[in-house]
Amino acid sequence: MNKIEELEHRLAMVLDDIKVIRKHIFKQDIAEVFERATPHSDECWTHFNNIEIACDLQSDESLTWKPFNQSKNN
């Protein structure tokens, strides 16, 4: 795999995990907890949606976003 293929694979794995986590949340009947606000959003679901949007290589929406956490690693 070249670097681009590796990155595409990694993003696909992130999206796969997000789907599993969402399914688990609904199966455990705890979705209402994720409707609560976070320090950065009106509800936690927004962060899940942001991950999906950022992983979508067909979308440019996330390219203008700034990180919530300003650390040396960002």
Image (cartoon, helix red, strand yellow):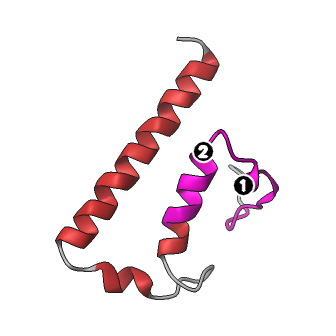
Left or right position of 74 against 8: right
Q: Residue at x 33, y 63 (%)?
A: 22
56 relative to 27, above or below: above
Q: Is the residue marked by circle 2 packed among few (<14), some (14-19), or many (20+) residues within 10 Å?
A: some
Spatial CA distance of label 1 from label 2 is 9 Å
* Number of residue marks: 2
Residue 29: x and y in percent read 20, 79
Q: In the image, what residue occupies the spot 52% across and 87% down?
A: 37
> Is 6 placed above or below 66 here?
above
Q: Which residues are magenta?
A: 48-70
Q: Is 57 included in the stretch rendered in magenta?
A: yes
Q: Secondary structure at mark 1?
A: helix
Q: Are marks 1 and 2 in contact (CB under 8 Å)?
A: yes
Name the residue at the left extreme. Answer: 28
Label 2: element kind: loop
Which residue is the site of mark 2?
Answer: 56
Residue annotated with mark 1:
62
Residue 61 on image: x %, y %: 74, 55
